[in-house]
């Protein structure tokens, strides 16, 4: 058995009495393979929690697999498979308002049925396909059932009541088992949750400690939203890059806990506003821009679209490394019917008007983020509301350069804001431009990038 450099692995047994040069680990610990040694089947590896490096036998490891692209419906507590209408009614007793399940349609094979309890009775809504999307009413369209359930848990829409509580099924494979098999399920007993450090649309974020490592913990208590957020962790399990916030794992305990590395200096927008131009010099701004560009270049290489790139979604570590975070809006699909969540001031024109998201629309957002960086965290389009921004940008308006912004950097922003997506540069080309700018400013990454702020 052989492992490639950088492979994430899970240990299969305890090794608590290591010899000289060997790594100490327990069953279920997470390990990163660093290098192959001269000895067959022995690798130099790093313990993901302790940071210690040492030798380990390949036979003691199994690969930490990424979860499927979209969580299997069998993992959703509300999906009951092929059951009849009367069976669904029986399962939804007592019929509390908002109690629901989804089943496969027996009468219309290939379609689904959303069964919802309201006013002590159960209503059945046929969910059918139209132009390869799911709908109940020809008004709201969804790419999958998870999106549909998430929408109706927050919006009453066409149905009689919002979806408040899923009816759990029994006797099927649980999310805990799947997460445990793939090595991403963490132990709630090893987690200590500390002070609140942030508040998102779906839940609070706390500082914490997991087995001696400082972590951030996003806690999502709503059952429906928690299941939808498994998509976020699904994407994150596939991503490994120094400029992306690293997922450590998830915990399913009275909701969903998403555990990531802790970024001590918070988000980039707040950091720039609080420090200002007298503390943060141009070289450091360039390094932040380059950090984000490298993270986005990696997403570009794996064909993932972020859709919500902004300074608020870039976090800064204790040693001043900027990392892209918040993949809650990340989509593998290039189109979506959901405009409600779009951050208008950061979103490309074709994404606003045609719902056409791509790496090129991320490049547009990156141009806005560059403007945020070089204006020290100012809100884009500071004198306009979102309706004015949408109208003006479609008419060709572009922001002026921030005060004291280098001319070459403003030129990069304007390239990102080309009306035609195909004319915008790739993140790879943007990285080359930023590296050239750093060279021309006599700013080496080693000199400026990790200055204490």
Image: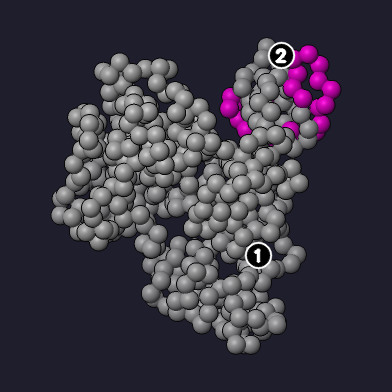
**Which label was assigned to residue 39?**
2
Please tell me which residue lies in front, 309 or 333: 309
In the image, the segment drawn in magenta is 1-24
Q: Nearer the viewer, residue 222 or 122?
A: 222
Query: Colour scheme in the image?
Result: one colour
Q: Please state the horizontal and vertical placement of residue 404, each as a whole percent of the image.
A: 22, 31
In the rendered view, would you say 321 is above or below 341?
above
Image point (37%, 45%), residue name: 310
Q: Residues within 10 Å of mark 1 (few under 14, many from 20)?
A: many
Q: Is residue 31 left or right of residue 282?
A: right
For the question of whether residue 137 can be seen, the reply is: yes
- Label 2: which secondary element: loop
| Labels 2, 1: front one | 1
The mark found on residue 77 in the picture is: 1
* Residue at horizontal 49 percent and vertical 58 percent from the top: 201
Is residue 23 toward the left or the right of residue 374 in the image? right
Expressed as whole percent of the image width and height from the top left, the position of residue 71 reads 58, 55
| Residue 387 falls in image quadrant | bottom left
Dot 1: element: loop
- Figure check: 99 above or below 258: below
Verify whether residue 8 appears in magenta: yes
Residue 127, percent across and down?
Answer: 50, 74
């Amino acid at each position: 058995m052989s492992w490639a450099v950088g492979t994430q692995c899970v240990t299969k047994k305890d090794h608590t009495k290591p010899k000289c040069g060997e790594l100490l680990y327990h069953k279920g610990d997470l390990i990163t393979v660093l290098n192959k040694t001269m000895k067959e089947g022995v690798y130099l590896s790093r313990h993901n929690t302790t940071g210690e490096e040492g030798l380990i036998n390949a036979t003691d490891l199994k690969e930490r697999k990424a979860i499927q692209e979209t969580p299997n419906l069998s993992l959703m507590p509300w999906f009951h498979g092929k059951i009849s209408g009367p069976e669904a009614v029986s399962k939804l007793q007592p019929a509390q308002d908002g109690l629901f399940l989804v089943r496969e349609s027996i009468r219309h094979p290939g379609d689904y049925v959303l069964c919802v309890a309201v006013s002590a009775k159960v209503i059945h809504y046929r969910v059918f396909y139209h132009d390869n999307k799911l709908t109940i009413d020809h008004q709201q369209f969804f790419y999958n059932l998870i999106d549909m359930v998430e929408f109706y848990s927050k919006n009453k829409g066409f149905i009689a009541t919002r979806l408040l509580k899923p009816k759990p099924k029994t006797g099927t494979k649980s999310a805990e088992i799947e997460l445990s098999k793939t090595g991403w399920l963490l132990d709630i007993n090893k987690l200590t949750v500390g002070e609140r450090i942030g508040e998102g649309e779906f839940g609070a974020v706390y500082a914490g400690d997991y087995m001696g490592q400082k972590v951030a913990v996003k806690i999502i208590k709503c059952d429906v939203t928690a299941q939808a957020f498994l998509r976020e962790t699904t994407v994150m399990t596939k991503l490994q890059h120094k400029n992306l916030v690293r997922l450590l794992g998830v915990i399913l305990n009275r909701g969903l806990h998403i555990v990531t590395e802790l970024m001590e200096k918070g988000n980039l927008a707040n950091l720039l506003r609080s420090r200002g131009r007298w503390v943060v010099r141009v070289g450091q701004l360039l390094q932040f821009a380059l950090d984000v560009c490298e993270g986005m270049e990696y997403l570009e290489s794996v064909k993932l679209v972020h859709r919500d790139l902004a300074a608020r979604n870039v976090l800064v570590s204790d040693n001043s490394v900027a990392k892209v975070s918040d993949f809650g809006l990340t989509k593998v699909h290039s189109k979506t019917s959901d405009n409600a969540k779009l951050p208008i001031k950061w979103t490309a024109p074709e994404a606003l008007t045609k719902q056409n998201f791509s790496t090129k629309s991320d490049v547009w957002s990156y141009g806005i983020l560059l403007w945020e960086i070089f204006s020290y965290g100012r809100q884009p389009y500071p004198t306009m509301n979102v309706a004015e921004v949408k109208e003006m940008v479609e008419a060709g308006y572009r922001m002026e350069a921030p005060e004291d912004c280098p001319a070459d950097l403003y030129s990069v922003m304007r390239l990102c804001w080309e009306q035609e997506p195909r004319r915008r540069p790739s993140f790879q080309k943007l990285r080359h431009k930023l590296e050239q700018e750093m060279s021309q400013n006599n700013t080496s990454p080693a000199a400026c990038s990790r200055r204490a702020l």
